[in-house]
Image (cartoon, coloured by chain):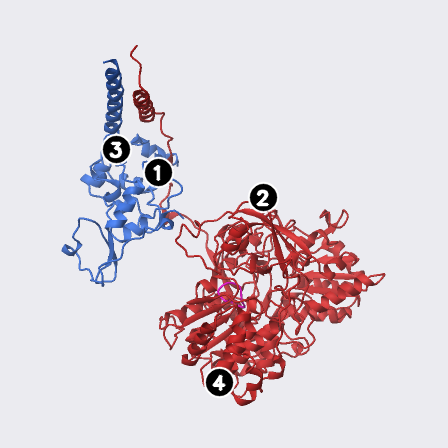
Chain colours: A blue, B red
Amino acid sequence: MRRRTLSLIGFGLVAVAAALVVVDRLPGREPGPVQPIPFSHALHAGTYEISCLYCHRQADRSIVAGIPSVQTCVDCHRGLDGPASQPPELIAAWENQETIAWVKVYDLPDHVIFSHKRHVRVGVPCQTCHGPVQEMERVRSIGALSMRQCVACHRESQVRMTTDGVARAVLPGTNPHAEIQLIDIKGGGRRPSIDCATCHK
Amino acid sequence: MNRLSRREFLAIGGGVTATSALLLSGCGGAKEVRRLYATLTREEEMKLGRDTWYATTCQECSAGCGLLVRTLDGRAKKIEGNPLHPLNRGKTCARAQAALQGLYNPDRHEGPLRRSGPRGSASFDRVTWDEAIGSIAPEIGGDVLFLSGPVTGNLHWLIHSFMGAVGSERLYFLDTFGPDRLRWTHRVAYGQETLPHYDLARADLIISFGAPFLETWLSPVHFSRGYGAFRQGDSGTGEHNPWGRGTLIQIEPRLSMTAAAADRWEPIRPGTEGLLALALANLLSPPGDWQPLLSSYSTTSVADRCGIRAERIEEMAESLERARAPLILGGGAAEGTTNGAFNLLAIHLLNRLLMERGKEVPIRANPPSPLAGVERFAATGDGTSYRAQRRTFRDLESLGEEILDASESPVRAVFLHGIDPLQSLPGSSLFRKAMERIPLIVSFAPYPDETSGLADWILPDHTSLESWGDSVPGAAPGGPVLGLCQPVVRPRLDTRATGDVLLELARAAGRELPWQAFRDVVQAGLRDLHRLEADRLEGISSTTFEEGLLAKGGWFAIPGDGDWTGPMAKAVPAEPPPFPVELLAAQEASFEGDANEFPFVLLPYPSALLGQGEGANRPWLQEAGDPMTSIAWGSWLEVNPHVAASLGLSEGDLVEVESPTGQVVLPVYPYPGIGPDVVAVPCGQGNELSGRYAKDRGANPLQILSPHTDETTGDFAWIATSVRLRPLGRRGTVVKYEGSARELGGEDHAG
């Protein structure tokens, strides 16, 4: 009996530990890092529907999406009324001409080259990788940036041309024909590359 | 006692271990916080510097491509191709890009240097320019030797004039892998003084005997464009191939990158290219008076000697019969043997025969250089056309012998410009030995090189981005081209243009030339050109003309832009002189080293990135990786995989490569693209004194070559030495990007 008890205790420990770890790592569990300014994406991108590209304005022309300059924030906030729209950290940063040190939420390893421009320009929604940012008070990683997910998406997607000659990503489970006219090239579209060198230069 | 079984122990132990591992990782220490710092001002309001683009001409190899250099706040930032330049039309190769790392190279000589230790110690004192010129000028006289790399245009003229003024005829322009043989044979075969324009874009079949035209041969960027049009047919690039997609057959002992881009690679025994060309000519029903010569080259007899099956030769002849615009190229391995000129002549003969058969062979005559009409160039040429009195490597070796035999060296001083003899001359060269006996060695090298240890004085030149100058491409694109160089930045260091130093030296030695500065010489060339072209330039002032040329990058008519009606359109003269068939008495290539004792022919080849070693001090080029093997930061020995296996060698094993005159140690790279009786080594590495990036990497195959020459022309024959391999039982390092050929599913070449 003692053997069985020992085994059960052993496996029990493993199961409990695994469950703890898994639950702790479920998407959405982690609240995301605390930022120097309590900036709410839910308010800006959700309630006010400000376009992602208004602040992350390099996303469609650079490999990095970019973060807004202090001036970009101040330019809008200056014209707003009420104390709630005058976050003291922002006002102080601008008055002292100091930068804001945001905490990185998504951090790819150095051996991965990911181009925002490539993906944004073919119409991949930001949310595909970053999750429903417009619902997040404090942005957290949805944990979608593993190589498995990159490759899976590249395997299942296509790049096709619109009648205007614009390349367009067709992601799995979407029906782009509903919105835009796509040209039927022979054999459908082109698969995005899954060559190693595409991401690991 | 209730003891645990082994299985239970493992299960429980494993469980506990896994649990701890998971718990530890789950509750591990805080993740490193990385931050993103917002800029203060919006990008629209940032004050950016204004960039200025200058047109100039690339000096990294002798092709002479046009460049545009972006400068910001007086610093050169980026190099692009000049879209107006007819050679490269906006494209560049990696070497041009890396010219920036020549300009900013941390090992550059900062000013004139005088040797302070014994020769070979490479220790120097900084001196002033006045001191250097004052000390050297009294030594200048008729016993001066001038050794230069390939130089064209006004600098070529100035070096000639300098030597004329000091009264010495010992002037050498040497270029190990350069087109001297091609120029010589082309003149014999077509009666033309300049190199031809091979218009790849208008061929439907190219048979290339060893010419690595996508890597290092003549004008690789120009040929890469032509190759693109040749392959893509109607590509809308303006370089329309009327024949659709062309076929390329590359015949050479080692699979080069050009061969890898071909439809078919035919490995051939080194030195037998001419025989194969003559056998093909024989199959193409030559005219009656050629038959006695050609009939002795029967397919079967040639097949054995070349190592190519007779059926393949017949197939090639049939493809030539079918082709409407075939083109035969010869270069690289085909010209590097002791019978290189014979091989090239045989290849020219094949082209001539195809022309006579009515094929539209796309070989165009290049017009004379734009400077050819200027009187002062009449005697010297501008470095691009055939020179009857040219001095070759063979002459240099006899001079070396003369110096070694004499009790006192008949050469009192040697000037070195654009050449690094200790790097590029074979280790057993007589001249190399003789250099130590020359009392005064003056080097104009801007960077430390292998010869700098021997130099008594170093009078560093500007880099190309800091200099005035001009460059006439030897392999012009079928129209007249004069590329201009202008300083895109102020000289960074206390260096001086070699042209200026030569003028000063001549002045200080009392043998004045009528010019103050080299810039004046270049400008005079432009004024001469303005005068010569007066009727085409209708009322454009000389100043406007000069400024226009500097902005544009030089004097060239752009093929296809409609305003050029000059010699561009002409093919090789309809009635070339009769082919000198008598020169085609068969020549066998000879190889130093008994075939039993030294079983492999050594095939050194210039690296597409490092050249002969000029690029070795540019880390970008070191890092880029060879296009075929992907190896970076080193050199290697290419051995047929079956041979490597039979010697028990695998990748990275060190072997001593021993020739009758020397040895180098290299790591083995089993290479399916090479025959069993040949081994190949890229040039460019094996430098000791050429700066921090070049130092202590790989080995220089030229060091173990025997100083053989082409029997006909006297040029250096770099494929004339056999070697044996001695495994050292140690492993070296091969840094590369690729996996092994097996991992990539490649098929071994049975060899």
Quadrant of image for the N terminus of chain B: top left
Q: Residue furthest left?
A: A178
Q: Position of residue B17 (x, y in %)?
A: 33, 23
Real-space CA distance between mark 1 and mark 3, rounded to the nearest whole angstrom: 16 Å
- Residue with the mark numbered 1: A107
Can residue B81 be seen here? The reply is: no
10 Å neighbourhood of mark 1: few (<14), some, or many (≥20)? few
Q: Residue furthest top?
A: B1
Which chain is mark 4 on? Answer: B
Real-space CA distance between mark 1 and mark 2, rounded to the nearest whole angstrom: 45 Å
Which chain is mark 2 on? Answer: B
Q: Nearer the viewer, mark 1 or mark 3?
A: 1
Q: Nearer the viewer, mark 2 or mark 3?
A: 2
Real-space CA distance between mark 4 and mark 3, rounded to the nearest whole angstrom: 83 Å
The label shown at residue B729 is 2
Instruction: Please report contact status of discs 1 and 4: CB closer than 8 Å, yes or no.
Output: no
Amino acid type of disc 1? Asp
- Residue with the mark numbered 4: B285
Q: Nearer the viewer, mark 4 or mark 3?
A: 4
Q: Secondary structure at mark 3?
A: loop
**Along the horizontal axis of the image, is B31 left or right of B671?**
left
Compared to residue B176, the image places residue B729 above or below, namely above
Instruction: Please report contact status of discs 4 and 3: CB closer than 8 Å, yes or no.
Output: no
Q: Secondary structure at mark 4?
A: loop
Please tell me which residue is depicted at 47% across the width and 53% down the height of the picture: B630
- Residue with the mark numbered 3: A138
Instruction: Please report contact status of discs 1 and 3: CB closer than 8 Å, yes or no.
Output: no
Q: Are both tags, 4 and 3, on one chain? A: no
Q: Which stretch did the figure color magenta?
A: B213-219
Real-space CA distance between mark 1 and mark 4, rounded to the nearest whole angstrom: 70 Å
